[in-house]
Image (cartoon, rainbow, N blue to C red):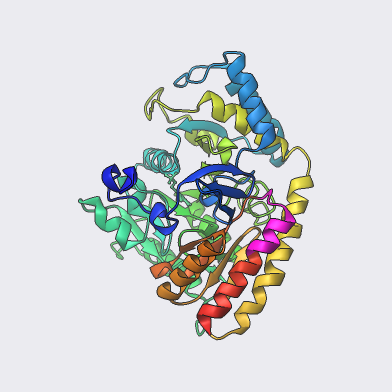
Amino acid sequence: MSIFEQRESEIRGYCRVYPVVFKSASNARQTDEDGNQYIDFFAGAGVLNFGHNNARMKQAMIDYLQEDGVTHSLDMHTTAKASFMQHFTDTILEPRNMPHKMQFIGPTGTNAVEAALKLARRVTARHDIVAFHHGFHGMTLGSLACTANQYFRGAAGVPLNHVSHHAFGCEPECEGCELGCGEQSLQRLRQQYEDSSSGVLPPAAFIVETIQAEGGVNVANKQWLQGVQQLARDFGALFIVDDIQVGMGRTGSFFSFDDLDIDPDIICLAKGIGGMGTPMALNLIKPEYDKLWSPGEHTGTFRGQGLSFVAGDVALEYFDDDTLMQQVKQKTARIMQKLTPLSQQPGIQVRGKGMIVGVDLGDGDKAKTVVNQCFKKGLLVGACGTGGRVIKVIPPLTIPDDDLDQGLNILYAAVNEVMQ
Ligand SMILES: Cc1ncc(COP(=O)(O)O)c(C=O)c1O
């Protein structure tokens, strides 16, 4: 029995799907202890947007360590933090005329969501949050209350209160639904908020993913998202976009919503923002709301780490010009060209935006078999969505074309074989 089976908690998950011991990794490939290589279409679920051991980030981190740069500072000022913040301001915020303040929180996505919810409740003096079916926002109690999946919710051990879940406005709309169920849910909420006898009060915030990643790669339609924002504005609620998995260039632009004409009050970022897999989480908050925080009120030991600032700073260089984003567009076309024909088979849907693509097989057991077959052929790919029925393709944005093609061929063959 390995040390993992002997001593690691039963909670372990992904290591059961990929039962090898990984030893090294470079860009879109991981190598196990026996020297077997795997193409990585999973990329830490949106953490490794710039690949494993990105050479530029690695060198910057080595230099920083050799200079005795500050690796831990709570939220004290450091040179690395100043450099990251200035770069983020110059490259991401100012070109978009975004006045948002940056709040660094504990380094996981769930921390970002917790802080966003707290602030929205503070701003509005309301308790309730509107979240959406199939949404995923994290595992701590506040964010878990916003997460829809019952398997995760069931582990809470306490009631998950003060959040209601409503139909998400996906693209394309569900078949047989004339107006669109997401649109209908917004209309229903509006009527309830307008009716002083409905018994329903407007919430503190609406929290939404523009693409539900864990929820099955459901892409929100632009009009619906604008409708959510409008509802928030009309009834004094905050509009929170959780861009934790699909931000940082995943869709061909820094934010997943850059082409959607929306203006969120709070944007939650984590995962890829630390550059090389070094953890960081960051909320972008409109100043009029941010000013309601009191110093240290939402604290945490790891609020921005030196090495994450260094690697994250290098990651921002990918957004100083549009070379990588153009490559993302080309690679997106390559992925869709290979995978779209699968949707001609009955029961299969292929959907996505940029370099997050879901192949919905409509059946969790079949998807599991595809994942296992891919693994045996040297491809790491994960399943998501209800019952794990959607294969999620989310490779590093920097994946070489040869690796991309090889991985797509493995996936295509596995789906064809299993769905026959
Ligand atoms: C959209 C979204 N929000 C929040 C989270 C939670 O992030 P973390 O696991 O770092 O707490 C995730 C994680 O997958 C996510 O995809």
Q: In the rendering, at what x and y percent does residue 219 appear?
A: 56, 64
How many discs appear?
0
Instruction: Residue 83: tell me if it is visible.
Output: yes
Q: Is residue 265 magenta?
A: no
Which of the pair 2/210 is nearer the observer? 2
- Residue furthest out toward the front: 34
Q: Main secondary structure of the magenta part?
A: helix
**Residue 271 drawn at (x, y percent):** 52, 43
Toward which corner of the image does residue 294 lie, by quadrant?
top left
Q: Residue furthest top?
A: 68
- Can residue 88 be seen here? The reply is no
Q: Which residue is depicted at the point 30% across and 46% down?
A: 141
Q: Residue at x 56, y 64 (%)?
A: 377
- For this view, does 89 lie left or right of residue 304? right
Does the magenta run of residues contain 399? yes
Q: Residue furthest left?
A: 158
The part of the image, by quadrant, that contains residue 318 is top right
**In the image shown, does 7 or 229 lie closer to the viewer?**
7
- Say if 42 sits above or below 363 in the image: above
Q: Residue at x 68, y 68 (%)?
A: 336
Looking at the picture, tell me which residue is in the foreground, 356 or 380: 380
Instruction: From this view, report whether residue 8 is shown above or below residue 133.
Output: above
- Which region shows up in magenta? 397-407
* Residue 220 percent across, percent down from the top left: 56, 64
Q: Position of residue 205 (x, y in %)?
A: 42, 50
Which residue is painted at 38% across and 41% down in the image?
A: 114
Residue 385 against residue 297 in the figure, above or below: below
Tell which of 412 and 140 is nearer to you.
412
